[in-house]
Image: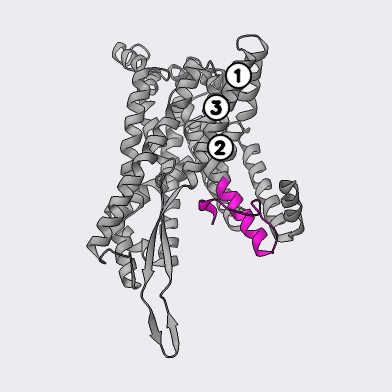
């Protein structure tokens, strides 16, 4: 009843209704383009060939672009070159003084960083497009001929088409952010992941109807998956608030400051990035094996690090712990936060300003990152255990653990928060009429 009322309230606000319809239209254009094949590629041949790459880097890449890579679509690269360029620029901000200066220059610096990110997107997309063209042209990569007439003309065509399509997808994402609802880049990734959900759900239902699974066991697994989703939601919105007291300032007859604010520190500051980094590295052996199928050493390594092996789960979990701390250290700088507080006249009660404040914040960040990192590692390896012990189909298991679930939950909560903000500004009740979760206050 409450949900139905909120949807009716959305329809009463013309601006919000137009933003949602505009967002849906852009996402429809993106999904339509993901079914247009690259000129010169046999779509049927590449679709049957890429089915063997479900558990390597190609499979991970195809997950984020909604199956466009398996169809050799013009949107095969999706928005991933933009994500890669953004990560590179963010890492440069931690080691390069010039980028650090731009990050502190406000709106002008942000525009400059966005411009460099776009240039980096074109460069990364061009390199990846060239790699895709070489892979498509080589029969050994897929076990069959997927490009009837390979050559320099096909390579140039593929590079131009894929790079231009990536820039177009980036433009679509920016249009959603400016004129739609939610973060456009994140929504494009999420809709690509969700596009494979109906197919995975049908495959899971078929396996039950054919008698390979027990209905009771399947219901238990569904209940466990619902609990996993709830845990991921809590992990996404959980924060540790640090109180900050501001000194009172008397200017004329007015008194400024004196209030208490809070620094919200997320338990999962790194988000989904540790899983993406670790998964990319873990899939490298099987990806190299697809290029060198006769190499015995690569066969042994790929077998030991198979998707359903214990070694895979152990190494994958440890790498996530490492990358969680690594990315958190880059994304959150306690010294910069402490300097900003001191300039604004703020202080943490019982802690001296300056280095002591930075050490205090760093100590808390280190402590709360540990449960977040452990939770990320457990969620990431859940699809492996569900596939191995729960007899769940791999495609369906990926939606209840790992990268897919974290992206869907985080993007869904962010979009829901923006919709609720529009409702509250127009004095309508949001989706949560009374208490709100901490991440949405």
- Mark whose residue sits in front, 3 or 2: 3
Q: Which residue shows up at 74% across the image and 55% down it?
A: 9
Would residue 282 be found to the left or right of residue 81 on screen? left
How many C-alpha atoms fall within 10 Å of the one at disc 3: few (<14), some, or many (≥20)? few
**Residue at which label 3 appears:** 224
> Which residue is under mark 2?
75
Determine the residue located farthest toward the front in the rendered image.
350
First to last magenta residue range: 413-441
Q: Position of residue 410 (x, y in %)?
A: 52, 44
SS class, disc 2:
loop
Q: Position of residue 388 (x, y in %)?
A: 47, 16
Total of numbered circles in the picture?
3
Residue 350 lies within the magenta run: no
Q: Residue most toward the top? A: 211
Q: Which of 321 and 45 lies nearest the eye of the viewer?
A: 321
Secondary structure beneath label 3: helix
Q: Position of residue 355 (x, y in %)?
A: 23, 62
Q: CA distance from mark 2 to mark 1?
A: 36 Å
Confirm or deny contact between disc 1 and disc 3 (CB under 8 A): no
Q: Residue 218, which numbered label?
A: 1
Measuring from the top left, give residue 259's x and y in whole percent.
Answer: 43, 72
- Between the residue at mark 3 and the residue at mark 2, the CA separation in whole angstroms equals 35 Å
Residue name at image x 47 percent, y 32 percent: 402
Pick whichever of labels 1 and 3 is earlier in the sequence: 1
């Amino acid at each position: 009843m409450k949900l139905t009322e909120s949807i009716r309230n959305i329809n009463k606000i013309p601006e919000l209704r137009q933003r949602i319809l505009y967002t849906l239209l852009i996402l429809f254009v993106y999904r339509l383009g993901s079914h247009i094949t690259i000129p010169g590629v046999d779509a049927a041949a590449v679709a049957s060939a890429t089915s063997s790459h479900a558990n390597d880097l190609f499979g991970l890449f195809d997950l984020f672009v909604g199956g466009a890579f398996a169809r050799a679509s013009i949107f095969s690269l999706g928005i991933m070159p933009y994500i890669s360029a953004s990560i590179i620029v963010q890492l440069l901000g931690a080691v390069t003084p010039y980028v650090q200066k731009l990050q502190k220059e406000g709106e002008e610096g942000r525009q400059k960083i966005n411009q460099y990110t776009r240039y980096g997107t074109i460069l990364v997309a061009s390199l990846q497009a060239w790699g895709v063209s070489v892979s498509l042209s080589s029969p050994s990569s897929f076990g069959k001929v997927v490009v009837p007439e390979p050559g320099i003309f096909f390579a140039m065509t593929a590079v131009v088409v894929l790079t231009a399509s990536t820039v177009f997808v980036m433009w679509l994402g920016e249009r959603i952010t400016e004129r739609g609802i939610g973060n456009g880049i994140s929504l494009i990734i999420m809709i690509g992941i969700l596009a494979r959900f109906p197919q995975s759900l049908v495959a899971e239902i078929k396996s039950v109807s054919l008698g390979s699974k027990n209905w009771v066991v399947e219901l238990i697994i569904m209940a466990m998956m619902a609990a996993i989703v709830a845990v991921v939601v809590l992990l996404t919105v959980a924060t540790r608030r640090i109180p900050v007291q501001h000194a009172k300032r008397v200017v004329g007859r007015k008194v400024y400051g004196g209030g208490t604010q809070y620094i919200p520190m997320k338990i999962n500051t790194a988000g989904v990035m540790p899983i993406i980094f670790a998964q990319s590295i873990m899939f490298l052996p099987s990806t190299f094996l697809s290029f060198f199928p006769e190499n015995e050493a690569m066969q042994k390594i790929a077998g030991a690090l198979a998707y359903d092996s214990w070694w895979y789960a152990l190494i994958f979990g440890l790498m996530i712990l490492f990358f969680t701390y690594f990315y958190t250290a880059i994304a959150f700088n306690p010294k910069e936060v402490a300097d900003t507080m001191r300039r604004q006249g703020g202080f943490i009660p019982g802690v001296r300003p300056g280095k002591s404040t930075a050490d205090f914040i760093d100590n808390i960040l280190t402590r709360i990152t540990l449960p977040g990192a452990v939770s990320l590692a457990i969620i990431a390896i859940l699809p492996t255990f569900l596939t191995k012990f729960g007899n769940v189909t791999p495609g369906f298991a990926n939606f209840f653990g790992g990268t897919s679930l974290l992206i869907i939950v985080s993007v869904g909560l962010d979009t829901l928060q923006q919709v609720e903000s529009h409702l509250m500004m127009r004095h309508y009740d949001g989706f949560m009429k009374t208490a709100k979760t901490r991440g949405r206050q």
